[in-house]
Image (spheres, rainbow, N blue to C red):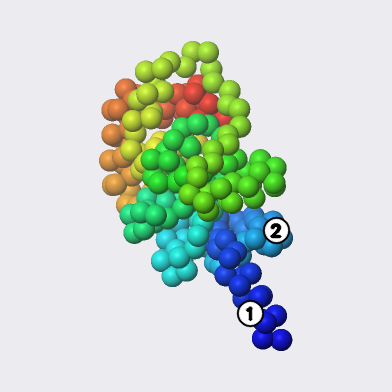
Amino acid sequence: MATDLQTHEDRQSTRIRVLIVDDHPVVRDGYRRLLEGTGEMTVVAEAETGEAGYEAFKTHRPDVVIMDLSMPGAGGLDAIRRIRHWDPEARIMVFSVHEHPIYSKKATEAGAIGYVSKRSPPGEMVESVRQVARGEPYMILGTVDVDSEARDDERQAIERLTLREFEVFNLLALGQTVQDVARTLNISQNTAGVHQTRIMNKLGLHNAAQLARLAIRHGIVKP
Protein backbone atom coordinates (compact mmCIF):
# COMPACT_ATOMS: atom_id res chain seq x y z
CA MET A 1 0.00 0.00 0.00
CA ALA A 2 2.78 2.45 0.88
CA THR A 3 4.51 1.67 -2.40
CA ASP A 4 1.31 2.31 -4.36
CA LEU A 5 0.82 5.62 -2.55
CA GLN A 6 4.39 6.66 -3.23
CA THR A 7 4.04 5.78 -6.91
CA HIS A 8 0.87 7.90 -7.12
CA GLU A 9 2.63 10.84 -5.45
CA ASP A 10 5.60 10.47 -7.78
CA ARG A 11 3.27 10.65 -10.78
CA GLN A 12 1.60 13.74 -9.33
CA SER A 13 4.95 15.45 -8.75
CA THR A 14 6.08 14.91 -12.34
CA ARG A 15 2.95 16.42 -13.86
CA ILE A 16 3.09 19.86 -15.48
CA ARG A 17 1.48 22.34 -13.06
CA VAL A 18 -0.72 24.83 -14.89
CA LEU A 19 -2.38 28.13 -14.01
CA ILE A 20 -5.28 29.15 -16.28
CA VAL A 21 -6.12 32.87 -16.57
CA ASP A 22 -9.29 33.54 -18.59
CA ASP A 23 -12.45 35.48 -17.77
CA HIS A 24 -14.83 32.82 -19.13
CA PRO A 25 -15.60 29.96 -16.69
CA VAL A 26 -16.69 27.64 -19.51
CA VAL A 27 -13.38 28.18 -21.29
CA ARG A 28 -11.40 27.52 -18.12
CA ASP A 29 -13.38 24.35 -17.46
CA GLY A 30 -12.73 23.18 -21.02
CA TYR A 31 -9.00 23.78 -20.69
CA ARG A 32 -8.90 21.97 -17.37
CA ARG A 33 -10.67 18.90 -18.78
CA LEU A 34 -8.47 18.89 -21.87
CA LEU A 35 -5.17 19.23 -20.02
CA GLU A 36 -5.89 16.99 -17.05
CA GLY A 37 -7.34 14.38 -19.40
CA THR A 38 -3.82 13.77 -20.73
CA GLY A 39 -2.68 12.48 -17.34
CA GLU A 40 0.43 14.67 -17.73
CA MET A 41 -0.88 17.97 -16.36
CA THR A 42 -2.56 19.35 -13.25
CA VAL A 43 -4.38 22.68 -13.11
CA VAL A 44 -3.27 24.11 -9.77
CA ALA A 45 -5.26 27.36 -9.98
CA GLU A 46 -7.60 29.46 -12.10
CA ALA A 47 -8.13 33.23 -12.33
CA GLU A 48 -10.57 35.41 -14.24
CA THR A 49 -8.56 38.64 -14.42
CA GLY A 50 -4.97 39.58 -15.08
CA GLU A 51 -4.60 40.95 -11.56
CA ALA A 52 -5.91 37.74 -10.00
CA GLY A 53 -3.67 35.73 -12.32
CA TYR A 54 -0.62 37.63 -11.12
CA GLU A 55 -1.48 36.95 -7.48
CA ALA A 56 -2.24 33.28 -8.23
CA PHE A 57 1.13 32.91 -9.92
CA LYS A 58 2.95 34.20 -6.85
CA THR A 59 0.97 31.83 -4.62
CA HIS A 60 1.17 28.63 -6.69
CA ARG A 61 4.34 29.06 -8.80
CA PRO A 62 3.03 26.93 -11.71
CA ASP A 63 5.23 25.43 -14.42
CA VAL A 64 3.12 27.03 -17.16
CA VAL A 65 0.65 29.92 -17.23
CA ILE A 66 -2.11 29.86 -19.84
CA MET A 67 -3.06 33.49 -20.39
CA ASP A 68 -5.92 35.11 -22.29
CA LEU A 69 -5.34 38.65 -23.56
CA SER A 70 -8.80 40.23 -23.49
CA MET A 71 -10.02 40.38 -19.90
CA PRO A 72 -11.52 43.02 -17.62
CA GLY A 73 -9.03 45.17 -15.80
CA ALA A 74 -5.36 45.39 -16.74
CA GLY A 75 -5.62 42.60 -19.31
CA GLY A 76 -3.32 39.79 -20.34
CA LEU A 77 -0.40 41.79 -21.69
CA ASP A 78 0.01 43.69 -18.43
CA ALA A 79 -0.34 40.47 -16.43
CA ILE A 80 2.37 38.79 -18.51
CA ARG A 81 4.70 41.75 -17.98
CA ARG A 82 4.11 41.78 -14.22
CA ILE A 83 4.59 38.03 -13.84
CA ARG A 84 7.83 38.06 -15.81
CA HIS A 85 9.07 41.04 -13.79
CA TRP A 86 8.41 39.08 -10.58
CA ASP A 87 9.85 35.85 -12.02
CA PRO A 88 12.01 36.21 -15.16
CA GLU A 89 11.90 32.42 -15.59
CA ALA A 90 8.09 32.23 -15.75
CA ARG A 91 6.81 30.25 -18.73
CA ILE A 92 3.71 31.86 -20.16
CA MET A 93 1.54 30.54 -22.97
CA VAL A 94 -1.10 32.75 -24.61
CA PHE A 95 -4.37 31.21 -25.86
CA SER A 96 -6.23 34.00 -27.66
CA VAL A 97 -8.94 34.70 -30.21
CA HIS A 98 -6.62 37.31 -31.73
CA GLU A 99 -4.75 35.82 -34.68
CA HIS A 100 -2.96 38.87 -36.08
CA PRO A 101 0.85 38.58 -35.76
CA ILE A 102 1.03 41.88 -33.90
CA TYR A 103 -0.70 40.29 -30.91
CA SER A 104 1.90 37.53 -30.69
CA LYS A 105 4.61 40.16 -31.13
CA LYS A 106 3.25 42.23 -28.24
CA ALA A 107 2.78 39.12 -26.10
CA THR A 108 6.39 38.16 -26.78
CA GLU A 109 7.54 41.66 -25.88
CA ALA A 110 5.68 41.29 -22.58
CA GLY A 111 7.41 37.98 -21.88
CA ALA A 112 5.28 35.14 -23.27
CA ILE A 113 7.10 32.29 -25.03
CA GLY A 114 4.04 30.67 -26.58
CA TYR A 115 1.04 31.89 -28.55
CA VAL A 116 -1.78 29.75 -29.94
CA SER A 117 -5.10 30.69 -31.49
CA LYS A 118 -8.14 29.48 -29.56
CA ARG A 119 -9.34 27.99 -32.83
CA SER A 120 -6.43 25.54 -32.84
CA PRO A 121 -7.17 21.79 -32.55
CA PRO A 122 -7.12 20.41 -28.97
CA GLY A 123 -4.04 18.30 -29.68
CA GLU A 124 -2.10 21.35 -30.74
CA MET A 125 -3.05 23.19 -27.57
CA VAL A 126 -1.86 20.28 -25.45
CA GLU A 127 1.43 20.07 -27.32
CA SER A 128 1.97 23.80 -26.93
CA VAL A 129 1.77 23.48 -23.14
CA ARG A 130 4.20 20.55 -23.17
CA GLN A 131 6.69 22.52 -25.25
CA VAL A 132 6.41 25.74 -23.26
CA ALA A 133 6.88 23.72 -20.05
CA ARG A 134 10.26 22.71 -21.49
CA GLY A 135 11.07 26.37 -22.06
CA GLU A 136 10.72 26.07 -25.84
CA PRO A 137 8.84 28.72 -27.87
CA TYR A 138 5.60 27.68 -29.55
CA MET A 139 3.84 30.08 -31.90
CA ILE A 140 0.83 29.11 -34.04
CA LEU A 141 -1.34 31.80 -35.66
CA GLY A 142 -4.20 31.77 -38.12
CA THR A 143 -4.45 33.69 -41.37
CA VAL A 144 -5.19 37.42 -41.37
CA ASP A 145 -6.78 39.51 -44.11
CA VAL A 146 -4.78 42.70 -44.68
CA ASP A 147 -6.10 45.38 -47.03
CA SER A 148 -4.01 45.99 -50.14
CA GLU A 149 -3.79 49.67 -49.15
CA ALA A 150 -2.13 48.87 -45.82
CA ARG A 151 1.35 50.43 -45.77
CA ASP A 152 4.52 49.19 -44.10
CA ASP A 153 5.12 52.53 -42.39
CA GLU A 154 1.68 52.28 -40.78
CA ARG A 155 2.38 48.72 -39.60
CA GLN A 156 5.74 49.77 -38.17
CA ALA A 157 4.14 52.71 -36.33
CA ILE A 158 1.56 50.38 -34.76
CA GLU A 159 4.29 47.94 -33.73
CA ARG A 160 6.16 50.77 -32.00
CA LEU A 161 3.26 51.42 -29.63
CA THR A 162 4.00 50.43 -26.05
CA LEU A 163 2.14 47.46 -24.57
CA ARG A 164 -0.35 49.73 -22.78
CA GLU A 165 -0.77 51.97 -25.81
CA PHE A 166 -1.49 48.94 -27.96
CA GLU A 167 -4.16 47.76 -25.50
CA VAL A 168 -5.79 51.19 -25.63
CA PHE A 169 -5.42 51.34 -29.43
CA ASN A 170 -7.21 47.99 -29.77
CA LEU A 171 -10.10 49.05 -27.52
CA LEU A 172 -10.51 52.37 -29.32
CA ALA A 173 -10.49 50.55 -32.65
CA LEU A 174 -13.31 48.36 -31.37
CA GLY A 175 -15.39 51.47 -30.82
CA GLN A 176 -14.83 52.12 -27.11
CA THR A 177 -14.76 55.71 -25.87
CA VAL A 178 -12.07 57.03 -23.56
CA GLN A 179 -14.49 56.54 -20.68
CA ASP A 180 -15.07 52.92 -21.76
CA VAL A 181 -11.33 52.29 -22.02
CA ALA A 182 -10.79 53.68 -18.52
CA ARG A 183 -13.41 51.32 -17.10
CA THR A 184 -12.18 48.30 -19.07
CA LEU A 185 -8.53 48.73 -18.05
CA ASN A 186 -9.32 50.00 -14.56
CA ILE A 187 -7.40 53.23 -15.06
CA SER A 188 -8.40 56.86 -14.66
CA GLN A 189 -10.16 58.65 -17.49
CA ASN A 190 -7.32 61.18 -17.54
CA THR A 191 -4.73 58.39 -18.01
CA ALA A 192 -6.81 56.82 -20.78
CA GLY A 193 -7.02 60.23 -22.47
CA VAL A 194 -3.23 60.68 -22.27
CA HIS A 195 -2.73 57.29 -23.90
CA GLN A 196 -5.20 58.20 -26.65
CA THR A 197 -3.36 61.44 -27.38
CA ARG A 198 0.01 59.68 -27.56
CA ILE A 199 -1.41 57.00 -29.86
CA MET A 200 -2.91 59.58 -32.20
CA ASN A 201 0.38 61.47 -32.34
CA LYS A 202 2.47 58.36 -32.97
CA LEU A 203 0.16 57.14 -35.72
CA GLY A 204 -0.47 60.56 -37.28
CA LEU A 205 -4.23 60.33 -36.75
CA HIS A 206 -6.80 62.99 -35.93
CA ASN A 207 -9.98 61.17 -34.89
CA ALA A 208 -11.48 57.86 -33.85
CA ALA A 209 -12.78 57.08 -37.33
CA GLN A 210 -9.26 57.24 -38.78
CA LEU A 211 -7.99 55.00 -36.00
CA ALA A 212 -10.70 52.41 -36.63
CA ARG A 213 -10.04 52.42 -40.38
CA LEU A 214 -6.32 51.94 -39.77
CA ALA A 215 -6.93 48.94 -37.52
CA ILE A 216 -9.34 47.41 -40.04
CA ARG A 217 -6.98 48.07 -42.94
CA HIS A 218 -4.26 46.08 -41.19
CA GLY A 219 -6.57 43.28 -40.10
CA ILE A 220 -6.13 44.02 -36.40
CA VAL A 221 -9.89 44.28 -35.89
CA LYS A 222 -12.68 43.15 -38.16
CA PRO A 223 -15.12 45.62 -39.76
Q: Which residue is mark 2?
A: 38
Name which residue type carries label 2.
Answer: Thr
Amino acid type at mark 1:
Gln
Mark drawn on residue 6: 1
- Vertical position of residue 164 compared to residue 150: above or below: below
> Which corner quadrant holds the N terminus?
bottom right
Looking at the image, the residue that sits furthest to the bottom is: 1
Residue found at x 45% / y 56% = 50
| Horizontal and vertical percent position of residue 41 | 62, 61
Q: Please tell me which of labels 2 and 1 falls first in the chain.
A: 1
The correct choice, above or below, for 181 with respect to 208 in the image is below
Residue 99 in the image: state x and y as whole percent: 56, 35
Whether residue 89 appears in this view of the structure is yes
Where in the figure is residue 84, as x and y percent of width and height? 37, 53
Taking the spot 50% from the left edge, 21% from the top edge, the residue there is: 217
Residue 87 placement, left or right of 52: left
Kindly identify the residue that appears in the image at 60 percent across and 27 percent down.
143
**Which residue appears at 44% of the width and 70% of the height?**
59
Q: How many marks?
A: 2
Describe residue 109's horizontal placement relative to residue 42 as left or right. Answer: left
